[in-house]
Image (tube, rainbow, N blue to C red):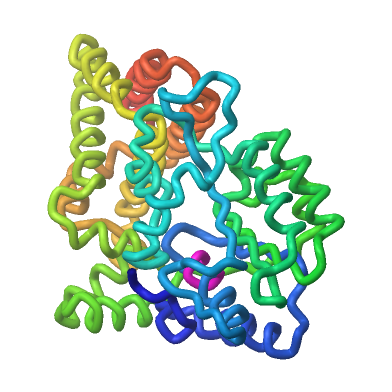
């Protein structure tokens, strides 16, 4: 099992790392804190490094994510073997969690869903997890010092869980530190947000990404610079660009097909397209729609003729040379609103076939709007 990450191993984020270490060393850390920021910026890496920094002062060292006073909570799904009343807890998937941590603290919800073999489900943090955490944190710490709870994606707590967690944060056991690692803080209960100190983690600086790509992935300077720029401060996105057959290639193919068939108003093929997309898992559908939003934006910006405004792969840029003129001031907001609405509907478990067929019909109209 790999050792857990130190601050020196984090990609970039030097200012934030120094700030957290200073607060810890001066005993000025808030009892409840929240690291917020985009995917791939290193929020979990910072949280784990901070926990390691604090706990390694004791006799028992953190190894491979394991320490008796370090507790992880994260979204889970319900397996078919469990009865309807069962509330999944993080311990049900703890082996998969440690296996993922062994590869490092940079990972996505999509990767975690795959590790859990989640299929077509949405992952949440249940009240069962809140109850389990309350039991653990009210016990005396193993080392006689801090007990640390790292909660990954707290915005995925259901209402019952969130309310129990609120009470725990309001009246925390002695020497307990809560570190929430949050991607969408606006989805978290306002009462919880108001009781935690927020730390905003910015995207990784392009130079830090470039350096990591050259040192950790042995890329030449030119390729590292291009990928770092394309990744937009997201280490996971940078790694995806290195992988042949990555998910974005699939999304790009879906996007190109939709635009071509919608322009021709080929209803039969558009119906087939919507059925194919509807067969994807809901989390994958959400990522697809996020990708579509990015491509609409990139196509629109391409029209300005400034390469510095463009963040596309070579294949995406080649396609946009002819396609970009169909995305203009008259329809760009329509495209963004369409995908955003669909993203919300899919998140609320709307019928995927209806959502994506509706998209095809509206895209066919938007492409002919000037």
* Residue at image point 65% right, 67% down: 148
Residue 31 painted magenta:
no
Q: Is residue 122 above or below residue 104?
A: above
Quick check: 4 above or below 169?
below
Which residue is at the front of the view, 352 or 300?
Answer: 352
Please say if 202 is above or below 332.
below
Judging depth in this view, the residue of 52 and 26 nearest the camera is 52
Residue 7 appears left or right of 116: right
154 lies left or right of 364: right
Is 281 above or below relative to 273? Answer: below
Q: Which residue range is magenta in the image?
A: 43-47
Residue located at (66% from left, 46% from top)? 132
In x, y percent, where is residue 277? 29, 25
Instruction: Identify the image quadrant of the C terminus.
Output: top left
The residue at the point 46 percent across, 37 percent down is 336
Residue 64: x and y, percent?
41, 69
Residue 179's image quarter? bottom right
Residue at the farthest right position: 171
Residue 338 visible in image = no
Q: Quadrant of the image for the N terminus?
A: bottom left
Where is residue 92 drawn, in percent x and y? Answer: 48, 42
Instruction: Please say whether residue 46 is one of the residues in the magenta stretch.
Output: yes
Q: How many marks?
A: 0
Residue 214's x, y, as percent? 22, 81
Q: Residue at x 74, y 90 (%)?
A: 26
Q: Quadrant of residue 314?
A: bottom left
Q: Nearer the viewer, residue 33 or 51?
A: 51
Residue 180 in the figure: left or right of residue 26: left
Q: Main secondary structure of the magenta part?
A: helix
């Amino acid at each position: 099992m790999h050792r857990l990450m130190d601050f020196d191993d984090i990609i970039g984020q030097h200012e934030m790392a120094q700030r957290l270490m200073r607060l810890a060393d001066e005993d000025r850390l808030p009892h409840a804190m929240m690291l917020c920021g985009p995917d791939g910026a290193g929020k979990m890496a910072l949280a784990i490094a901070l926990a390691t920094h604090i706990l390694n002062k004791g006799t028992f060292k953190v190894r491979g994510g394991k320490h008796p006073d370090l507790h992880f909570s994260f979204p889970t799904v319900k397996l078919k073997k469990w009865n309807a009343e069962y509330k999944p807890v993080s311990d049900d998937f703890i082996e998969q969690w440690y296996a993922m941590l062994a590869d490092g603290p940079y990972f996505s919800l999509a990767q975690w869903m795959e590790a859990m073999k989640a299929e077509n489900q949405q992952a949440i943090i249940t009240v069962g997890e809140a109850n389990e955490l309350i039991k653990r944190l009210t016990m005396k710490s193993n080392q006689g010092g801090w007990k640390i709870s790292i909660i990954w994606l707290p915005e995925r707590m259901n209402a019952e869980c969130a309310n129990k967690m609120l009470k725990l944060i309001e009246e925390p056991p002695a020497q307990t530190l809560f570190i929430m690692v949050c991607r969408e803080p606006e989805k978290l209960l306002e009462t919880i947000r108001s009781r935690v100190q927020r730390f905003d983690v910015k995207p990784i600086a392009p130079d830090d990404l470039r350096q990591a790509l050259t040192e950790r992935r042995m890329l030449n300077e030119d390729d590292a610079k291009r990928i770092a720029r394309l990744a937009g401060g997201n280490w996971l996105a940078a790694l995806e660009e290195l992988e042949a057959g990555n998910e974005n290639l699939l999304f790009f193919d879906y996007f190109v097909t939709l635009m071509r068939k919608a322009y021709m108003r080929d209803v039969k093929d558009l119906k087939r397209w919507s059925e194919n997309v509807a067969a994807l898992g809901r989390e994958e559908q959400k990522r697809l729609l996020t990708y579509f939003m990015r491509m609409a934006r990139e196509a629109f910006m391409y029209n300005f003729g400034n390469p510095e405004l463009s963040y596309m792969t070579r294949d995406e840029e080649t396609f946009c040379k002819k396609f970009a003129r169909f995305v203009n001031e008259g329809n760009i907001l329509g495209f963004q609103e369409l995908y955003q609405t669909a993203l919300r509907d899919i998140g609320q478990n709307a019928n995927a076939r209806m959502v994506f067929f509706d998209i095809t019909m509206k895209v066919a109209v938007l492409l002919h709007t000037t």
